[in-house]
Amino acid sequence: MVRKSVTAIALLALALAGCTTTSSEGGGTQVSTQGVTDTEIYIQGFGPITGPASWVGLGNRDGFALAVKEINAAGGVHGRKIRFEFHDDAFQVAQAQQVARRIIQQDKPFMVYAGTGSTTFLAVADQLRQSGLPVYNGFSGSEAARKTPEVDNMFHGEAVSTKWVAPSIADMVADNLKATRVAILHEDGEWGRTLCAQVATELQGKSGLQVVANETYPAAGNDFTGQLVAIRNANPQVVVNCGLFPAAKIILRQARELGLKAQFVGDAGQANATVWTGNEAAAEDWLFNWYEPQFLTDTTGAQGEFLQKYKAEYPSAPTGRPNHADNFSYTAAYLLKSALEEAGKDLTAEKFIEALAAVKDARPTPISPNVSCANERHECFVDLVWMRIQGGKAVPVDDAGLAQIAGKVSGS
Amino acid sequence: MTVIQLLVNSLTLGAIYALVALGLVLVFKSSDLVNFGAGDWVLAGAYIALALLTAGLPLYLVLILAPLGGALMGLVIDRAVFRRIMSASPWTFVVASLAVGGLLRELAVLRYQSNHFPFPPVLSRDPVEVLGVRITPQNLWVLGATVVVVTALLLFFRYTTYGRALEAVAQNRVGAQIVGINLSRALMVTWALAGAVSAVAAVLIAPSTDVSPEIGLLLVKGFVAAALGGLDSLEGAVMGGVAVAAIETFTQVYLNQAAVDVVVYGLLLVVMWVRPAGLLGRRVVRRV
């Protein structure tokens, strides 16, 4: 009886081992090929399409889907059509882990497009790495989710890491605006919390600068009076806000209502037209960083053409769409398509990863910044630019504009 | 001056919580039922207003038509759902109210997904300073409108035959029927009123929060406000709303963000212990 049980367990273990498509040995992850037929390449994505962070998943889903539709209409990749499906993680860690398990164990796509925020991506990043599937992190800028050297199968997209964003913000505050009293305000999610922690560290290295307040707010909150009054009492010249645009809009409005006159500086997570639409006076001169050659609302050039295509595909999209997730995922889909093409007709995960890791100085779409994935961190995007709101519009900040804002800061 | 400024800001936030709480109190006061989907009724009111706005109607007309749309929604829900379970157990109603709320939310998501739609303010958001305290005309509008809604409901329940009849239904359905009150009609009026008040709350709240499914989450704070003030007290809903907002704001400033919910829920438990019916409530809620 005992022998039979042992045999059964051994057989079961062998069977399970046989079902596993990947293995982790000595810290390296073995990649695996699945989800490819003669006619189809199967890509799965996930992100929050419900809940307070739904704009993240909706943008990632819709931008990617628009590109896939165009790619398939143009004949696909080496004759294969791309099939794209997107799952809702509701920006909940438990749900994201469940979705990741389902994708890895049940759906078995060729690759995974992670269109979720930092909190949830961080919760599933190791699971995805160990799966051996090619993974493209389209939207998390969390440094904690990156590893150096990166394992072979994971790449990071247009949401630039906090490792690069934090020094950029600190330099803007200390070197360009020449502020000496700075307040830090950040959401309680992974992105805002870790970004502002790194900004605070960077600011410590700036001589003559003092962080006079450090306040946290709930990412899904709709009243920030308490935090703003505490900051106002500390009398800063500049407030660095690390978070996302739904809160940023209310924060700028309430800061003005409360008479907080400090200069606000934000990150690209807040770069959305809803922040200043109908909120122009409160948002005037607001500074934020951005990742692409043109801003989302620019109706000229490549972005203007993209807007037309987007509105034709999604006619009922509200103000603020396309958001940066739409733009990032649209470019991501074309970047992945170019790597799929480069990998050749005899597509394997290894060839695809090799092709993606070799991308250098590319522009997958006309709206895209420069892309180079050929680095040990597999970070495909690192470009940052600064924007300001001027007359109710987002414009790139030039030296004259910066000098004007710096003058205001030094006089405050 | 900071303390006064915080109090003024708490009033505006408190008005938002109070408006959500009013929907709960109104139903409880006139039917002895707790609508666990009340947050989603506000959400539905917001989407009705959004639909009217995107259809090109001017804002003033939206402010008039949205409450009418809300009332119509209440009538339909009463006819389709609540009337059919009128004599079932309170537990059945709890489940039905949750299901109705969920259905309203998912219908909105089906049509609009989970996008955030900005909603225009009625008045300016440029602050004016009065005796060193800053407040915006829009916030004054929200406060004023909340006072008008509460006063109108108070007058309705205190001085109209129908208002008194609704309270009688809540206190004793059988007795109310014996004295000639038409129960079906009374409940129909209750749900129509609840729909209208939810839509009023929605158009007052939406400029601060945008129109999105998250509006429904305000139910949690609305529920705390209603329980704190007393589930059968309209004045209690307002007092509870303002109290919750003030506690949140002052805790944030003088303690920290992480302590906010601990203080709010802790205080609610203390109030429940000392006055189970809430600060201004008259009746103890029955166990269901």
Image (cartoon, grey):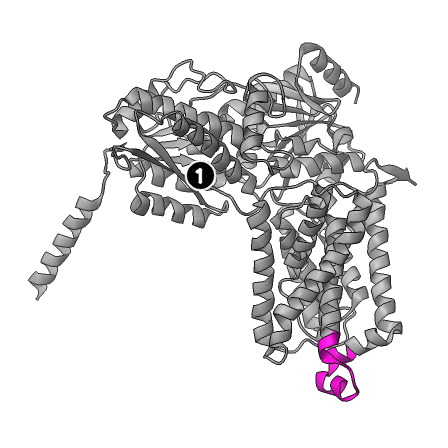
Left or right: residue B178 versus residue A381 is right
Q: Residue at label 1?
A: A121
- Write down the chain letter for disc 1: A
Q: Residue at x 79, y 85 (%)?
A: B180
Amino acid type at image mark 1: Phe
Percent across and percent down for residue A71 are 41, 27
* Front in this rendered view, residue A37 or A396: A37
Residue A285 in sight from this viewpoint:
yes
Asked whether the viewer can see residue A258, the reply is no
Depth order, front residue of B58/B216: B58
**The C terminus of chain A: image quadrant:** top right
Q: At 31% from the left edge and 30% from the top edge, which residue is drawn? A: A80
Give the main secondary structure, helix, strand or loop, of the magenta stretch: helix
Image location of residue B278, percent across then percent down: 73, 69
Provide the residue span drawn in magenta: B167-186
**Residue B34 position (above or below residue B145):** below
